[in-house]
Image: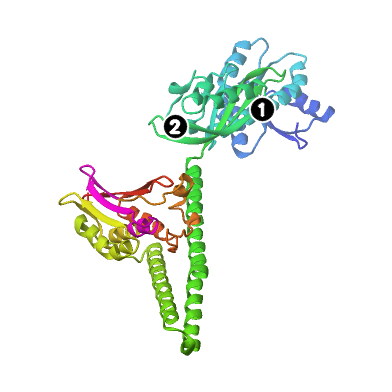
Amino acid sequence: MDKKNIRLLYIEDDLVDQMAFKRLIKEHNLPFDLTLAGSIRAGREVFNADVFDIVISDFLLGDGTSFEILPEMIKTGIPVIMITGTGDEDVAVKAIKMGASDYLIKDVDYGHLKMLPLVIESSLNKKHSDDRIKKLSMAVEQSPSMLVITNKEGLIEYINPRVTEITGYTSTDILGTSIFTLHSNHNPAEMVDDIAQTLLKGQKWMGNTYHARKSGELFWESTAISPIYDNEGHLTGYIRVAEDITEKKKTEEAIKKYSEELRESNASKDKMFSIIAHDLRTPFNGLLAFSDILSNDFESLSKDEVQEYIEVIRDLSRNTFNLLEKLLQWSRLQTGRMEFKPSAIDIDHLTKSVANLLSANAKGKNIKLSCSVEEGLQVFGDTNMIHAVIRNLTSNAIKFTPENGSVNITALKLSDIYAEITVSDNGIGMKTGEINKLFRIECQHSTKGTKGETGTGLGLLLCKEFVDLNNGTIRVESEPGAGSRFIITLPLNEN
């Protein structure tokens, strides 16, 4: 019992019984704060005016029976003990059915009063136990987690409202279903076996599981399943506690995606800084060096030497300009400042324009540069971007093709939706490992051509981004010594 006194209302119209109970409390120093009422009316007034832990009431009182006030007292949750006349057990049974906590039968020797302290203690303990059960029941019913309770065979016996709220399934849908079947529909067999084996060992299983709502929508759960044992240590069932973590999973995926984009962005910046630090510094060092020679030693240089230095300065200037142009394109593309103006493109006209532009490069290595385009073929895209892609791929093909080789630009209608443009050569080709690195910013590096031509390693990356922006694809077929084929698909029209 609690250390503080029990507040007790005793409704009894027999003064002898009242005196006997008061004497009992005093003699045994019982922890009761006693309030007496001698009628139904007085009992109701006192009950409504004060707060009590327990009520004891005789059945037959001067102004009626306690059945008149018993329901309203029981409704408050306070234990009520009924005292009836000798042998009047029918009344006691009826009182218990109405919700009374206990009853006593009066006897002439007042033995029932001596039993009252034990009955009071039992009734209060029962109330405390009932209160705890009620709280636990409310906690389970109102829990924000999904709770499932099974029997020892794993068959579901109870689900709380949260299960229905999250999954759409009701008790009728789920009760009697095996908890293992619940996990087998959308999770690996290995996971279901692990759950069974863990529980068989009497251990708690925890993990993330995948399920379907009644609507068919899939969702993620954070799941914990534990065995339940009685006081003797016998298994009585299992309890499953789960939370919907779908949004958390989406957030994790978004963070992961953002981290990857951030990594790629940082790699892009690192690449740009690397190019600026190395590829720009190197040609400028050359420009400064040869300019100094021409400026300081012009009078002592032969005509051939002057001509040689001027050609070196010209080549360095051209390469540096090309690099700056690509860096500016790259920067504008990354910051969204590059204007995108898609329209119908005449591929025959575009490829011939590229061939004319690079004809001098091809002639310098005695390379045959040819174009073959299906008549009337058009694609839908940004003309400047597609021209830059074909120009870059063709320039690379010339760069990596030895003297007396060939480079071909072909284009044809692939389907009712796409056209295919191919830039092929019979040059030095590439290994599989090299192909896999072509369009990755962190793997970019410059490779010299067959006559020592230099580059930045940035052009193919721009080609990939331009093609993607125009709703196309780009892929490579190549073998060492057998040349390369860069194949682009582009949409035929806006739709």
Q: Which residue is found at the position 25% from the left and 50% from the top? A: 410
Horizontal placement of 402 versus 119: left or right?
left
Q: In this orientation, which residue lies closer to the viewer: 344 or 347?
A: 347
Q: Which residue occupies the extreme bottom position in the image?
A: 299
Q: Position of residue 450 (x, y in %)?
A: 42, 58
Residue 240 in view? yes
Residue 24 position by quadrant: top right
Q: In terms of sequence position, does the residue under pointer 1 or pointer 2 come before the other?
A: 1
Q: Is residue 494 above or below residue 15?
A: below
Question: What's under tag 1, amino acid-wise?
Answer: Ser
Q: Is residue 189 left or right of residue 374?
A: right
Q: Is residue 407 magenta?
A: yes
Label 1 crowd bin: few (<14), some (14–19), many (20+), radius 10 Å = few
Question: For mark 2, what is the residue?
Answer: 167
Distance between the alpha carbons at the discs numbered 1 and 2: 33 Å
> In this rendering, does residue 37 appear at all?
no
- Look at label 2 and name its amino acid: Thr
**Colour convention of the picture:** rainbow
Q: Residue furthest right?
A: 27
Q: For the residue labelled by badge 1, is the local secondary structure a helix, a strand or a loop?
A: helix
Q: Categorize mark 2 by other alpha carbons within 10 Å: few (<14), some (14-19), many (20+).
A: some
Callout 2 secondary element:
helix
Question: Is residue 288 one of those drawn in magenta?
Answer: no
Which corner quadrant of the image does residue 356 belong to?
bottom left
493 or 302: nearer the eye?
302
Mark 1 highlights which residue? 129
Q: Position of residue 225 (x, y in %)?
A: 60, 28
Segment tinted magenta in the rendering: 394-422
